[in-house]
């Protein structure tokens, strides 16, 4: 069972929020925050670093908002550790849809989530 399945299993807003807040504590943090890692389009200041130098996806991130950190951890779970070739084939938008993220997130949080996804996809291209 994936983290997205666990998220989708939470039927109530409060349960989903608690789930994301608990995921925020698991997020592998950045050692340092640089302007090049800042994600534009997020409501809260957010940084995302993608490293593929080993041929595998290694993601690190941070945000001023705990809920965004939880969303980041959820997003990272789709890609972390995968060979770059396999990561390019991940359909994150489908995972978002199946988990019901659009119904849960405000438009600004959705924009931020998609901005993080776009940053990952651009880094994999």
Image: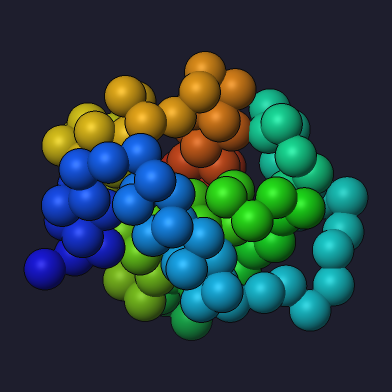
Residue 53 in percent (x, y) is at: 55, 75
Quadrant into which the C terminus falls: top left
Residue 50: quadrant of the picture: bottom right
Residue at the spot x=43%, y=57% of the render? 18
Quadrant into which the N terminus falls: bottom left
| Looking at the image, residue 19 lies above or below residue 118 | below
Q: Nearer the viewer, residue 55 or 62?
A: 62
| Looking at the image, residue 120 lies above or below residue 101 | below
Residue at the spot x=79%, y=79% of the render? 31
Residue at the spot x=42%, y=75% of the render? 55
Count the marks: how many? 0
- Relative to residue 80, is residue 37 drawn left or right? right
- Relative to residue 3, is residue 9 drawn left or right? left
Does any portion of residue 49 appear in the rendered image?
no
| Looking at the image, residue 45 lies above or below residue 72 | above
Residue 122 in percent (x, y) is at: 52, 41
Does any portion of residue 13 appear in the rendered image?
yes
Q: Nearer the viewer, residue 76 or 123?
A: 76
Which residue in the rendered view is the most extreme toward the top? 107
Residue 62 in percent (x, y) is at: 70, 61
Residue 91 in percent (x, y) is at: 23, 41
- Relative to residue 76, is residue 116 drawn left or right? right
- Relative to residue 56, is residue 3 drawn left or right? left
Residue 109: quadrant of the picture: top right
Residue at the spot x=44%, y=29% of the render? 105
């Amino acid at each position: 069972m994936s983290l997205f399945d666990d998220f989708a299993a939470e039927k109530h807003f409060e349960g989903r929020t608690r789930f994301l807040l608990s995921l925020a504590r698991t997020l592998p943090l950045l050692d340092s925050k640089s302007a090049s890692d800042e994600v534009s389009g997020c409501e809260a200041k957010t940084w995302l670093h993608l490293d593929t130098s080993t041929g595998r996806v290694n993601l690190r991130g941070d945000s001023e908002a705990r809920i965004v950190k939880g969303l980041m951890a959820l997003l990272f779970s789709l890609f972390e550790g995968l060979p770059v070739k396999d990561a390019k084939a991940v359909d994150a938008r489908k995972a978002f849809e199946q988990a019901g993220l659009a119904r849960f997130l405000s438009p600004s949080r959705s924009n931020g989530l998609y901005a993080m996804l776009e940053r990952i996809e651009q880094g994999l291209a």
